[in-house]
């Protein structure tokens, strides 16, 4: 990547390739938010899924990451990352388009929904690994926090618009039709990514001089021996274990136990996501004030504590909708602050040729326990009830920020000037 003085670097809003990446992500995320609500609603309302089945469905969405994540990282470092993103978008569009077709033919089943979720999750794993690996090849190192903040703001906007739009579309047009619109957004994203003209594709030919697992171990070794990366991976793993329990049952909890309608549930996700753009915009400011490390820790503390309000929603009469929205607002305020600074720190300390494998390793370690969380949530809810399961999960999430507090992350004030300069 060409290194220039900060004064000579053009703003990202005048960077054509960054704008295309930003627009592609925005289109894709808006659609993904539709499916994130539409598929569980389809399972609960149309297929009358049980708590255990909802746990299984949630697990299928995250299971591909620990299964194929490391190999996806190897191929991300071997192949043009832009091509991986485009292929992932087109594949997910095709898969999602089959759901309304099966519904029209009266062939849609819970098993088929799980299969599509598993395949979409597999392609999504490739996308999630290649996406942050592409950004450092497009922008200057000093622009990483700014670039990640702008990308996170677009994600936040989709989290605000998407769920409310999803609730309205599901109510007016049914869940299968809403999923069709999601498929279209993936195609829009693919078209925008195809217009990126970065030299990354030409600069990185396919490398296959060693076995895939030998290359994957390089990413594992870097994360294992770097205390900063290891601490972030462990914190994310703990957080995702317990938050996946909450997410697996949230629709069921809201609809059946709290009595919310799909439109009200959409309102929870939409209004509750108002903290995202504020947190994303403030990420750089907070890091400059208290340091990158403490920005990561503070964001985690805020977002983790907010999840304690979810089980309270079932204990306070008439306060369910307000408490769920409040929980979302606070969590989405802290989440981007920790996520943006974690990602920027990871990108800054990772050698360019290891970005794909390091991102893959972090993603695999972060999500390895998530499928277990979804299944445990379903089993626990069937035996002990949804309410008690939500309490246990919300308390367990708090261990995530404790891991960061006892790590060396708090000592990091600014992003290092060269990869792997910290360990």
Image (cartoon, grey):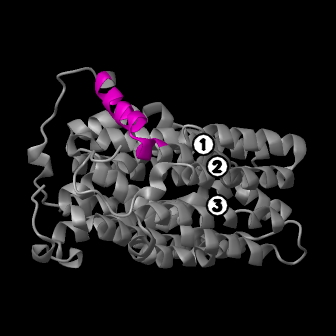
**Residue at 54% across / 50% down in the picture?**
99
Magenta span: predominant SS is helix
Residue 339 at x, y percent in the picture: 46, 60
Tell me if 147 is positioned left or right of 30 in this view: left
Bounds of the magenta segment: 214-230
**Residue at 60% across / 55% down in the picture?**
401
Element at badge 3? helix
- Where residue 244 is drawn, which disc sits there? 2
**Residue at 69% across / 76% down in the picture?**
326
Element at badge 2? helix
The residue to which callout 1 is attached is 370
Q: Compared with residue 79, is residue 22 higher up or lower down, i.e. above or below?
A: below
Residue 226 in magenta stretch: yes
Quarter of the figure with residue 13: bottom left
Q: Compared with residue 229, is residue 194 higher up or lower down, i.e. above or below?
A: below
Of 253 and 384, the residue lying toward us: 384
Residue 270 in magenta stretch: no
């Amino acid at each position: 990547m060409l290194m220039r003085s900060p004064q000579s670097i053009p703003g990202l809003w005048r960077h054509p390739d960054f704008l295309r990446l930003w627009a592609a992500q925005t289109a894709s995320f808006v659609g993904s938010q539709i499916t994130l609500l539409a598929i569980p609603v389809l399972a609960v309302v149309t297929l009358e899924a049980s708590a255990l089945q909802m746990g299984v469905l949630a697990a299928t969405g995250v299971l591909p990451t620990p299964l194929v994540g490391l190999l996806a990282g190897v191929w991300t470092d071997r192949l043009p990352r832009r091509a991986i993103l485009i292929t992932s978008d087109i594949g997910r569009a095709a898969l999602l388009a089959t759901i309304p077709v099966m519904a029209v033919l009266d062939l849609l089943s819970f098993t088929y929904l799980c299969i599509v979720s598993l395949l979409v999750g597999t392609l999504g794993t490739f996308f999630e690994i290649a996406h942050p690996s592409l950004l450092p090849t497009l922008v200057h190192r000093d622009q990483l926090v700014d670039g990640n903040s702008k990308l996170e703001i677009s994600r936040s906007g989709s989290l605000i618009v998407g769920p409310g739009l999803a609730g309205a579309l599901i109510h007016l047009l049914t869940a299968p039709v809403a999923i069709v619109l999601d498929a279209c957004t993936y195609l829009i994203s693919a078209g925008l990514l195809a217009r990126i003209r970065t030299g990354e594709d030409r600069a990185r030919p396919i490398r296959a001089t060693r076995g895939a697992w030998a290359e994957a171990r390089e990413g594992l070794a870097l994360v294992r021996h770097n205390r900063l990366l290891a601490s972030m991976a462990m914190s994310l793993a703990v957080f995702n274990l317990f938050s996946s329990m909450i997410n697996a049952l949230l629709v069921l909890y809201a609809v059946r136990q709290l009595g919310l309608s799909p439109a009200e549930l959409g309102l929870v996700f939409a209004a509750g996501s108002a903290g995202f753009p504020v947190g994303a915009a403030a990420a750089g400011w907070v890091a400059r004030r208290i340091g990158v490390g403490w920005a990561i820790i503070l964001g985690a503390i805020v977002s983790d504590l907010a999840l304690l309000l979810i089980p309270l929603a079932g204990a306070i009469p008439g306060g369910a909708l307000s408490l769920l929205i409040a929980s979302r607002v606070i969590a989405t305020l802290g989440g981007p602050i920790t996520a943006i600074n974690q990602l920027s720190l990871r990108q800054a300390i990772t050698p360019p040729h290891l970005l794909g494998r390091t991102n893959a390793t972090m993603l695999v370690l972060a999500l390895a326990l998530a499928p277990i969380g979804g299944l445990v949530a379903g089993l626990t809810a069937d035996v002990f009830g949804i309410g008690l399961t939500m309490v246990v999960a919300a308390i367990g999430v708090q261990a995530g920020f404790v891991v960061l507090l006892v790590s060396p992350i708090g000592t990091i004030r600014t992003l290092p000037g060269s990869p792997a300069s910290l360990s």
